[in-house]
Amino acid sequence: MLKVQNLHASVDGKEILKGLSLDIPAGEVHAIMGPNGAGKSTLSYVPTGRDGYEVTSGSATLDGENLLALAPDERAARGVFLSFQYPLEIPGVPALTFIRTALNAQRKARGEAEITAPEFLKLARAKAGDLKIDFDMLKRALNVGFSGGEKKRMEILQMAMLSPRFLILDETDSGLDIDALRIVSDGVNALRSPDRGMLVITHYQRLLDYIKPDRVHVLSGGRIVATGGPELAHELEREGYERYEKAA
Amino acid sequence: MSLATAIRDRDVAELPGKRDEDWRWTDLRGLIRALPEPSSAFAGDVGEGPFDALADDCRTLVNGGEALIALPANSKATVALRLVSRGAGSHAASVTVTLGANARLRLLETYESDAGSVSQTSLTIVLADGAAVERIVLARDHEDAVSVSQAAVRLAPRAEFGQTIVASGARRQRLETRVIHPGGHATLRLDGIYLLAGKRHSDQTTVVTHESTDGATIQLTKGVVRDQARGIFQGRIVVAEGADHTDARMGHHALILSDRAEVDAKPELEIYADDVACAHGNTVGALDEDALFYARQRGLPEADARAMLTEAFIGEVVDRIWFDGARDVVRDWAAERLRA
């Protein structure tokens, strides 16, 4: 599935990722934890192809295919999905229109037929129901005037509709109260499957009580400095990142 | 100085230009060395206009002429008004629109040129008490044309006037609207859209004078310019002494999609009354890169993502059109231009 090898990446000439390696097989959920400034957001943007993040060496592949050579929309069509820490507001574009346009663009890129309007609406109703999203909200401009929790639920809805193969969740728990956290986590857990991989980036252990990872990695100073099972997250919650910051 | 006089007298010295403050960004005097020959009468078929299917009545002026649209009190009409230029001559047209008390008019106006003509249209629109007009202007001129439209609107108490100008530019294109606003709970909406490519130029100029108390004006103009195009917005709202409780809001926002495109904006509020609520906002910038990445991350190719975001940007103005039939025509036309 996703393989990142010795990745070095810079922003404005400043190196943020300094030889990061990760191997996430299909069917597994890996968590990345780390202090502020460790490079967590960069790790979400480099595999998805955001402008301004320059890869100076190393590789990132999905099932052997070089992601770094593809445009952001081509990576999306291959099944890479990023749930944004701060989902963007898209004034003037109803959420349903946005999601349908995205879904059909991905289908087109993969040489598949467009989804029909009735099929799409049926799918949207079902997935919105699972996430306790009022269907009328999907007729409003995407994320405009939505609360933090609503925006995160819209991310998960898009994820469920687009059915990606590899998910990157960037600080998905930020801004969520406990009820929203449960709904969002249920949505993510429903997508766990043997042919899908997930990278969950978080500052706090809390999210990992709901989305249970197979492996936990500590990111510090632009590299993975420790790897362990779920117990590592609890240890970090107890003892903090200080020890690892020194190691970096 | 006026283009109408210059055309009538075939005198370039009459052309407005840089030295006229209101025309400094649309300098006709510097541009036109000699006026073309007067346009000849055109007897051929001008085809269908974009609003014909929506109108009860179609008025077409080809290469100048005069028209009168007069609605008696309490009547209702939807009129397509086409100002058509055929060939590369010069000509002027004059249109008078009058509404009796409580009459309602949808005026669907188009400018259609097919070559390097020089044309001027004067419109006088007078509303009686309680009358309502929605004026939609689709200015789809030829890239070599010089096209100027000048409307003088006089409202009455309790009248309602809504306007949306949609322009794609020309060699020089100017759409000017001057409104005398008597207050008295009359309301005014003056909106605009310009979508410019190539070397096209479009100028939307508005002047609203609030003469008395309790008047409202809302204005929203949005533009998208690319290549070497140039968009101009000049909006002036004057609130005369004593015109208290005036509520006036003006917004102009433009997206510049290339390094060589240009937008010039001059929003002005001149307030001589004490108790008013007035505001203006003006922004000129590029497409939001964060939103663009977001859309691409969801699978939209770059060109589609840009088109979707620019259409949405313009959509806010399109949505304010009251007449749904005209709204659809404008939306489709704008989408076609943005995807071209």
Image: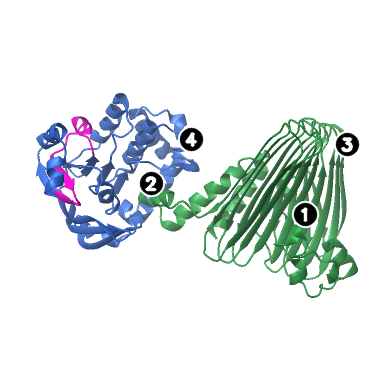
Three-letter amino acid code at the position of disc 4: Lys
Three-letter amino acid code at the position of disc 3: Pro
Tag 2 residue: A103
The answer for how far apart the CA atoms under marks 3 and 2 are is 53 Å
User: Tell me, what hue is chain A?
Assistant: blue
**Res B291 seen here:** yes
- Quadrant of the snapshot with the C terminus of chain B: bottom right
Tag 1 residue: B82
- Mark toward the start of the polypeptide (3 vs 1): 3
Q: Secondary structure at mark 1?
A: strand
Q: Secondary structure at mark 3?
A: loop
Magenta residue check for B19: no
Tag 3 residue: B72
Q: Residue at x 83, y 71 (%)?
A: B12
Chain of the residue where label 4 is placed in the rendered structure: A
Magenta residue check for A223: yes
Three-letter amino acid code at the position of disc 1: Arg
Q: Which quarter of the figure has residue B74?
A: top right
Q: Residue at x 34, y 30 (%)?
A: A131
The answer for how far apart the CA atoms under marks 2 and 1 are is 42 Å
Around disc 4, counting alpha carbons within 10 Å, would you say few (fewer than 14), some (14 to 19), or many (20 or more)?
few
The answer for how far apart the CA atoms under marks 4 and 2 are is 17 Å
Tag 4 residue: A139
Residue range of the region highlighted in magenta in the rendering: A203-224
B161 shown above or below A7: above
Q: State the green chain.
A: B
B262 shown above or below A28: below
